[in-house]
C-alpha cells in the first residue's frame, strides 16, 4: 500500500484537476445566466440596452474572459470564498449546507438499508444458488434493478394515493413541530417512501454483486477444506465465506456513498424532496456557475473520500489486499 | 435448521414491502375551516427577496406588495395605493395622489417618499427589467400626498408599463441595502399588501402568508395562504385530487392538459376555464435571412399547419383556432378577422410562386439551385407541452414537402440562438405580460428596435414603427382603436409570426372554496379579486361542523 503522504498528494492533485475540468465545462455551456436570474420578461426589457445588460453582467461577476475568471475563482477558493449563488443570491456554501442534510437524510438510511439487505439476501442466495427461493428472489431483484428509480417512485406514489389517500410529498421541517421527538417521528413517516425507493434500486444492484461473489468463493479450495473439517451452516457462511465476499460489497457501498451527495435527482423530483440532486439540476439549467462549481467540488471530494475509505476498509476486511498477495 | 432459518429470511422480503404502507400513514390534513387556502404550485422559489428572485416577485405581486394602480378582470384600472391620478393631454406628466393612512407591515407609515425612492432605487441599482425608468422618466417630484412623473416623451401607457408593475418598496428598509440581489432576511418581505410573509419552510417547500389585519382596503377572506411547491405535476394532481391542496396556481399558466385528464372525473373538483392572454404556442419567422424571409414562404407555412389537429391533440379541443392577426381575443384591442386554416394546394402554389419546385422523387420542394427547401426550427425543451408539437409540426411540414430540422434547447441556449438569428422558424410562446408590455398587442416581441433579451424582433419596417410609436404617444381612444387594428393588420399582412393555437387556461379548484375569478393579467386564478371574493362552501362548512 502506497505511503499515506503520496496518497494525499495524489488525491489533492485529482481534486485540482477535476475542479478545473468542471470550471471549463460549466463555463462552456451555451446560454446566459441572466435570463434565469431576472426572469424572461425582465430580461427581454433589459436586453434592449446592451450597455445596461453589460452593467448587470458586471454586477453579477459574469464579465471577463475565461482565464481571468478561472484565476479569480482559484484566488477566492484559496481564501475560503465559495462565491454567491446567482439564483439564490446567498453564499454558495450556505445554499449547499441547506440542501446537503436533506440528501444525507434521504440517502444515508438507504445506503445502510441496502447494504444490509444486499449482504443478507445476496449471501443466502449465493449459498443456496440454484434453489427455488433463490431463483425467485433473483428474478425479483433483476426486475427491480431494471426498473428506473423514478418509475418505482411513481408506482409507489400511485399505490399510496389509492391506499392511504395521503400523498407523501417528501421534504419536511423537523423543527416546525412541537417536540423534537414528534418531529423525528413525522420525519420517519415522510422519509419512508423515498428511502424505500432508493433502497430498492441500490439493494438490487448490491444483491447481484454479493451473490456472484459468494458463488465464486464457494468454489475456492479453502471452502472445501472447511467443509471437510466438518463445518456447515452458519459457521461456514459467517466465519469463512462472508468475510471473503466483503471487499466487492465494500467497494460498491463506497462508490454509492461517494455519489450520495449528488442526490437521487429523479426520486427527489417525484417526492419534491429539496436535496442536492434538484439543486444541481436547477443550477445547471439556470447556468448558476458559482453554485455548480460548489456542488461539483463537494461531490468530487466526497467521491474521493469514499474511495479512500473503501481502500482502508478493504484492507481491514481482507489483509491480503494490504501486501498485494491477493493479486498473486 | 440453518436452511429453515434461511427460508424465513427470504420470506421477510415480502413482509417488509407490506409494512411500507403502514409506515406511510402520515397525518391527515385538517378539514378546512375557512382559515387556510392551500395553493399547489410548480413555481420555483429560491429566496424571499422579491428583487433577487423572480419566483418570489410573483408572490409579492399577488400578496405582499402593492402598486400604484391595478387592473380588474375587464382591464379597467383602479387605484391600489393611489386614490386618483391624472395625466396631461400628451401623456408626458402623470400625477398620483396616495390614499390616506397607508402603512407598511411593520407599522411604518407609507408615503410618496417611498414611491419616489422605489423608482430611483430600481434604476440606481440596475435592477433588471427597470432600466426603462432611466429613458422614460426624466424627473420625479412630490408635493404633500401626490407624486408627479415627468416623462421624457409622450407615453400613454404609463399605467400599464409603470404604475401597475412597479411594486413599491419601503424606503426605510431598502435604502440601507447596497446589493439588493444578494440581500436576504425577513425584513425584505415587508410590504404594504393584504398579506404578510410569515415563513418559508424550505425543507418542506411550503410558503406561508398571514392576512394583514391593518390593510388599507377590504380584507381578503382566507386568513392564511400556503403555497405548496411541487417538483412534478403528477404528485400535484394527486394532491389536488386528495384534498391536500385546494387550487393550482402558476403565473401565466393553466394546468397542463396531460395531467388535467386525471382530475376530470373527481367529484370534489371543478375545472374553471378562461381564454389566456398570452399565446401558448406560436411560430416565429426569420424575416431577414433564409427561406422564411420570403413572404410567400411564410404564407405557405401558415397554410401547411393543421390548426384543428393541434387544437384537438395538444389542447384537448379546448383551444381557440387563431387568426393571422396573432393577438388573442382576451387582449384589449382585439380585432376579429378570418381564422387561419390549412390549405395545402394554396400553400404549394405560394411555394412555386416563391421559386420552389416540387421534386416528385423525394417529395420535397427544391430551390432554383436544386437544393432541398430545408428549414431549421429552434424550440425550447423546458416547455413540456411543446415537445410533442415539435414532432407534429415536423411531420406536417415534411408531408407538405418542406424539410424541417429541429434544434431543441433550454431557455438560455434558445435565447442565444434568437439573439444571433440562428434559426428559420422559432417555436415560442408569449406571456400575458409580454402581450401588454411596451405598446401592447405583443409588439414588444416583434419590434426590431427592441432586439435583445430573447425578443424575436423581426418587424423592422417604418409602417410597424409608426404604429407602435403612435400607440405609445396617443391619448385619443378612437385613434388607439384604429392603431390597434392597424397592428393586427400588419401581423396578418407581413406574418412576423403565427399563433398555432390560442389557449384557454384550465384551472382545477376543489369545491371547498367558492368565489374564484380568473384574472389573466395577474397570472390566473389566484389574484386580488379572488382573494376578496372567496368564501368557504356550505358543504365544507357542514363537514367541518360549522
Image (cartoon, coloured by chain):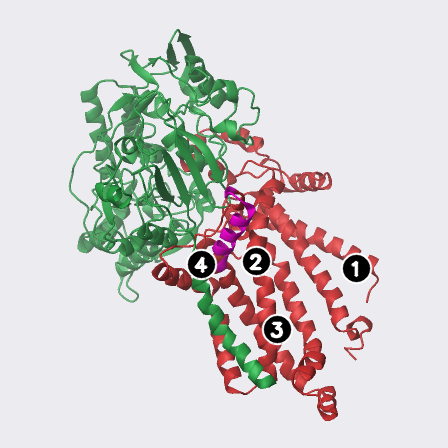
Chain colours: A red, B green
Q: Position of residue B214 (x, y in %)?
A: 37, 22
Q: Nearer the viewer, residue B220 or A311?
A: B220
Q: Secondary structure at mark 2?
A: helix
- Residue B96's label in the rendered image is none
**Most common SS among magenta residues:** helix
Helix, strand or loop at label 3? It is: helix
Mark 1–mark 2 contact, CB under 8 Å? no
Which residue range is magenta in the image? A176-192
Judged by depth in the image, the label closer to the viewer, 2 or 4, is 4
- Same subunit, labels 1 and 2: the answer reads yes
Give yes or no for contact between labels 4 and 1 (Cβ–Cβ under 8 Å): no
In three-dimensional space, the C-alpha distance between marks 4 and 3, rounded to whole angstroms, equals: 26 Å
Q: In the image shown, does A222 or A81 lie closer to the viewer? A: A222
Marks 4 and 1: which is nearer the front? 4
* Residue named by callout 1: A7
Per the image, is B204 magenta?
Answer: no
**Dots 1 and 3 on the same chain:** yes
Sequence-first tag of 1 and 2: 1
- The label number, if any, that marks residue A107 in the structure image: 2
Let me know if residue A189 is in the magenta part. Answer: yes
Secondary-structure class at tag 1: helix
Amino acid at each position: 500500500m502506497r505511503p499515506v503522504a503520496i496518497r494525499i498528494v495524489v488525491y489533492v492533485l485529482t481534486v485540482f484537476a477535476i475542479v478545473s475540468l468542471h470550471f471549463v465545462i460549466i463555463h462552456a455551456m451555451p446560454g446566459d445566466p441572466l435570463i434565469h436570474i431576472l426572469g424572461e420578461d425582465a430580461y427581454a426589457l433589459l436586453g434592449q440596452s446592451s450597455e445596461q445588460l453589460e452593467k448587470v453582467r458586471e454586477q453579477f461577476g459574469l464579465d471577463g474572459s475565461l482565464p481571468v475568471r478561472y484565476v479569480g475563482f482559484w484566488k477566492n477558493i484559496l481564501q475560503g470564498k465559495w462565491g454567491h449563488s446567482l439564483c439564490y443570491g446567498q453564499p454558495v456554501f450556505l445554499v449547499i449546507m441547506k440542501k446537503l442534510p436533506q440528501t444525507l437524510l434521504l440517502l444515508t438510511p438507504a445506503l445502510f438499508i441496502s447494504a444490509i439487505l444486499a449482504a443478507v439476501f445476496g449471501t443466502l442466495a449465493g449459498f443456496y444458488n440454484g434453489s427455488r427461493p433463490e431463483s425467485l428472489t433473483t428474478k425479483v431483484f433483476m426486475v427491480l434493478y431494471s426498473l428506473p428509480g423514478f418509475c418505482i417512485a411513481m408506482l409507489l406514489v400511485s399505490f399510496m394515493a389509492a391506499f392511504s389517500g395521503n400523498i407523501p410529498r417528501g421534504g419536511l421541517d423537523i423543527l416546525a413541530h412541537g417536540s423534537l421527538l414528534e418531529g423525528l417521528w413525522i420525519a420517519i413517516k415522510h422519509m419512508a417512501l423515498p428511502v424505500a425507493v432508493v433502497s430498492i434500486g441500490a439493494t438490487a444492484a448490491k444483491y447481484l454483486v454479493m451473490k456472484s461473489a459468494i458463488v465464486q468463493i464457494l468454489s475456492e479450495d479453502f471452502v472445501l477444506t472447511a467443509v471437510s473439517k466438518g463445518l456447515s451452516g452458519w459457521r461456514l457462511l459467517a466465519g469463512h465465506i462472508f468475510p471473503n465476499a466483503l471487499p466487492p460489497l465494500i467497494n460498491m457501498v463506497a462508490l454509492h456513498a461517494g455519489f450520495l451527495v449528488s442526490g437521487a435527482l429523479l426520486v427527489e423530483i417525484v417526492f419534491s424532496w429539496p436535496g442536492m440532486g434538484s439543486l444541481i439540476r436547477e443550477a445547471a439549467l439556470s447556468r448558476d456557475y458559482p453554485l455548480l462549481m460548489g456542488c461539483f467540488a463537494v461531490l468530487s471530494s466526497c467521491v474521493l473520500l469514499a474511495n479512500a475509505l473503501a481502500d482502508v476498509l478493504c484492507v481491514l476486511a481482507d489483509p491480503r489486499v494490504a501486501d498485494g498477495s491477493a493479486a498473486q | 435448521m440453518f436452511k429453515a432459518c434461511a427460508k424465513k429470511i427470504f420470506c421477510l422480503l415480502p413482509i417488509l414491502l407490506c409494512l411500507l404502507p403502514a409506515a406511510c400513514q402520515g397525518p391527515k390534513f385538517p378539514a378546512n375551516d375557512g382559515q387556510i387556502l392551500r395553493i399547489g404550485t410548480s413555481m420555483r422559489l429560491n429566496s424571499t427577496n422579491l428583487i433577487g428572485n423572480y419566483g418570489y416577485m410573483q408572490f409579492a405581486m399577488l400578496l405582499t406588495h402593492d402598486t400604484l394602480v391595478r387592473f380588474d378582470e375587464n382591464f379597467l384600472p383602479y387605484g391600489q395605493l393611489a386614490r386618483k391620478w391624472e395625466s396631461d393631454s400628451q401623456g408626458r406628466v402623470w400625477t398620483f395622489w396616495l390614499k390616506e393612512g397607508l402603512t407598511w407591515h411593520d407599522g411604518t407609515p407609507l408615503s410618496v417618499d417611498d414611491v419616489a425612492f422605489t423608482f430611483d432605487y430600481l434604476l440606481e441599482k440596475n435592477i433588471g427589467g427597470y432600466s426603462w425608468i432611466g429613458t422614460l422618466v426624466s424627473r420625479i417630484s412630490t408635493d404633500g400626498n401626490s407624486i408627479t412623473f415627468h416623462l421624457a416623451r409622450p407615453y400613454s401607457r404609463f399605467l400599464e408599463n409603470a404604475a401597475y408593475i412597479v411594486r413599491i418598496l419601503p424606503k426605510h428598509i431598502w435604502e440601507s441595502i447596497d446589493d439588493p440581489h444578494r440581500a436576504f432576511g425577513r425584513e425584505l418581505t415587508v410590504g404594504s399588501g393584504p398579506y404578510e410573509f410569515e415563513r418559508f419552510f424550505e425543507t418542506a417547500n411550503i410558503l406561508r402568508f398571514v392576512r394583514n389585519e391593518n390593510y388599507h382596503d377590504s380584507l381578503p377572506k382566507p386568513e392564511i395562504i400556503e403555497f405548496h411547491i411541487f417538483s412534478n405535476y403528477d404528485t400535484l394532481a394527486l394532491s389536488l385530487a386528495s384534498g391536500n391542496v385546494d387550487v393550482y396556481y402558476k403565473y401565466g399558466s393553466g394546468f397542463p392538459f396531460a395531467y388535467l385528464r386525471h382530475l376530470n372525473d373527481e367529484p370534489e373538483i371543478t375545472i374553471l376555464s378562461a381564454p389566456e392572454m398570452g399565446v401558448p404556442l406560436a411560430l416565429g419567422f426569420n424575416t431577414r435571412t433564409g427561406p422564411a424571409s420570403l413572404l410567400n414562404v411564410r404564407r405557405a407555412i401558415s397554410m401547411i399547419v393543421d390548426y384543428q389537429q393541434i387544437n384537438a391533440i395538444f389542447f384537448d379541443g379546448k383551444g381557440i383556432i387563431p387568426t393571422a392577426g396573432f393577438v388573442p381575443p382576451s387582449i384589449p384591442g382585439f380585432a376579429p378577422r378570418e381564422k387561419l386554416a390549412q390549405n395545402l394546394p394554396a400553400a404549394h402554389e405560394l411555394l412555386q410562386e416563391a421559386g420552389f419546385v416540387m421534386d416528385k422523387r423525394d417529395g420535397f420542394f427544391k430551390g432554383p439551385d436544386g437544393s432541398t427547401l430545408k428549414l431549421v426550427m429552434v424550440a425550447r425543451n423546458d416547455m413540456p407541452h411543446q415537445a410533442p408539437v415539435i414532432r407534429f409540426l415536423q411531420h406536417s411540414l415534411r408531408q407538405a414537402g418542406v424539410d424541417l430540422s429541429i434544434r431543441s434547447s433550454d431557455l438560455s441556449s434558445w435565447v442565444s440562438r434568437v439573439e444571433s438569428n440562428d434559426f428559420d422558424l422559432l417555436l415560442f410562446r408569449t406571456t400575458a405580460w409580454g402581450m401588454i408590455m411596451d405598446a401592447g398587442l405583443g409588439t414588444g416581441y416583434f419590434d426590431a428596435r427592441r432586439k435583445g433579451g430573447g425578443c424575436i424582433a423581426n418587424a423592422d419596417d417604418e409602417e410597424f414603427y409608426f404604429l407602435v410609436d403612435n400607440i405609445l404617444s396617443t391619448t385619443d381612444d378612437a385613434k388607439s382603436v384604429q392603431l390597434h387594428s392597424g397592428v393586427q393588420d400588419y401581423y396578418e399582412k407581413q406574418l412576423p409570426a403565427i399563433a398555432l393555437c390560442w389557449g384557454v387556461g384550465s384551472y382545477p379548484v376543489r369545491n371547498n372554496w367558492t368565489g374564484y375569478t380568473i384574472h389573466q393579467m395577474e397570472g390566473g386564478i389566484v389574484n386580488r379579486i379572488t382573494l376578496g371574493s372567496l368564501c368557504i362552501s356550505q358543504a365544507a362548512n357542514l363537514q367541518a361542523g360549522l
